[in-house]
Image (spheres, rainbow, N blue to C red):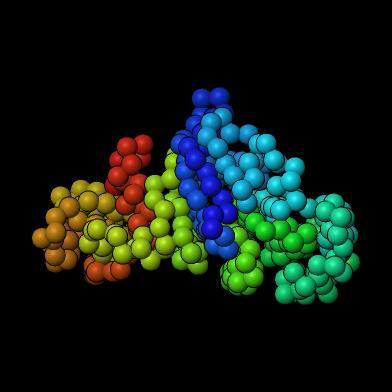
């Protein structure tokens, strides 16, 4: 059963194409992720899904309701958590929750069971002003407010941005529980490691969807040989890799560089010898398994809009 169906969505701001012919569908009770960097079109897409802005072209239905023609009815079925904290900072935790419950003609008591596992973590601070909460507590309050009216579809725009690692893990555990209760969840994130927690992901860039698949399938379809390369001077390492004749791509990943060769006949000693000749001490080159981010970067290099990303 389909919960969300989008066909050929387009949206532009003057001369900037925020979305170009975006099509996808989300199943009922699915945890569907949109993965991509800032500016890829995720927020614009979510605002269309939640009836806040109108697309220039294409059509969208959510729970079989047209986002343009039936937006009033649809809004009662949606829970939306925008990327920027948008609750009232001068109201307390409890006052914010009561306010959002009243908008949908319900009460905290009536639907407390929906948010209990989330709200119990911030309930000891119910009299604290929302603006005084930590990042993780703000996100838990925002999720509680988005859930208090028992939505069937939950739309979350980068809900863990700026949140500490522990709170991020807790937040995703909450999403898994909501999914198990039949809530359809659409979430965007710039964190590639969170992609593996979704049922399916859509990789986005330049207002387009490059690929839609389960996370493991995305990884399994990675076609290149991938190596981790380390040396003492990472900046010089990247510069030298740009000059190495066998370099297909070289992207910094933390303290290492993820390197793909042009030829399948490449073997690590070729690169080690090259780096030693260029004054790198004890370079380390070894084969690794790709992650979602490696797959994303590969798709980027194949995109006609991406330019020459192999020389970052």
Q: Is residue 161 above or below residue 209?
A: below
Tell me where residue 204 appears, x and y as whole percent.
Answer: 45, 47
Q: Is residue 252 above or below residue 168?
A: above
In front of the other: 28 or 299 = 28
Tell me where residue 140 appears, x and y as whole percent.
Answer: 71, 65
In front of the other: 226 or 236 = 226
Residue visible at 78% across and 62% down in the picture = 148
Q: Is residue 82 left or right of residue 128?
A: left
Q: Quadrant of residue 152?
A: bottom right
Residue visible at 52% across and 44% down in the picture = 6
Q: Is residue 129 visible?
A: no
Tell me where residue 294 appears, x and y as whole percent.
Answer: 35, 58
Residue found at the very far top of the displayed protein: 14
Residue visible at 68% across and 65% down in the picture = 136
Quarter of the picture containing the N terminus is: bottom right
In front of the other: 119 or 66 = 66
Residue visible at 28% across and 69% down in the picture = 288
Total numbered badges shown on the rendered structure: 0
Q: Is residue 87 visible?
A: yes
Q: Is residue 17 left or right of residue 97?
A: left
In front of the other: 92 or 113 = 113
Q: Quadrant of residue 124?
A: bottom right
Q: Is residue 70 left or right of residue 109?
A: left
Tell me where residue 301 appears, x and y as whole percent.
Answer: 31, 46
């Amino acid at each position: 059963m389909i919960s969300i169906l989008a066909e050929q969505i387009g949206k532009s701001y003057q001369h900037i194409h925020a979305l170009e012919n975006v099509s996808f569908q989300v199943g009922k009770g699915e945890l569907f992720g949109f993965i991509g960097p800032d500016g890829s079109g995720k927020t614009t897409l979510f605002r269309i899904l939640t009836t806040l802005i109108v697309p220039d072209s294409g059509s969208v239905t959510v729970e079989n309701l047209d986002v343009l023609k039936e937006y009033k009815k649809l809004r009662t079925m949606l829970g939306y958590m925008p990327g920027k904290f948008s609750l009232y900072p001068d109201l307390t935790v409890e006052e914010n929750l009561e306010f959002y419950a009243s908008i949908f003609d319900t009460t905290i008591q009536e639907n407390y069971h929906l948010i209990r596992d989330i709200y119990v973590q911030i309930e000891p601070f119910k009299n604290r002003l929302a603006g005084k909460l930590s990042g993780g507590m703000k996100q838990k309050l925002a999720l509680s407010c988005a859930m208090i009216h028992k939505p069937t579809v939950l739309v979350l725009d980068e809900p863990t941005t700026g949140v500490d690692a522990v709170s991020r893990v807790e937040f995703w555990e909450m999403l898994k529980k909501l999914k198990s209760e039949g809530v359809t969840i659409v979430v965007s994130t710039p964190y590639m490691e969170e992609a593996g927690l979704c049922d399916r992901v859509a990789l986005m860039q330049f207002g387009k969807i490059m690929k839609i698949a389960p996370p493991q399938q995305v990884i399994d379809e990675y076609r290149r040989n991938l190596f981790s390369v380390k040396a003492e001077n990472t900046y010089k390492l990247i510069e030298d890799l740009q000059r190495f004749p066998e370099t297909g791509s070289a992207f910094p990943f933390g303290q290492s560089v993820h390197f793909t060769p042009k030829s399948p006949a490449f073997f690590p000693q070729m690169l080690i010898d090259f780096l030693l000749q260029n004054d790198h001490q004890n370079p380390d080159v070894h084969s690794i398994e790709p992650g979602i981010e490696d797959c994303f970067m590969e798709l980027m290099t194949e995109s006609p809009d991406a330019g020459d990303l192999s020389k970052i």
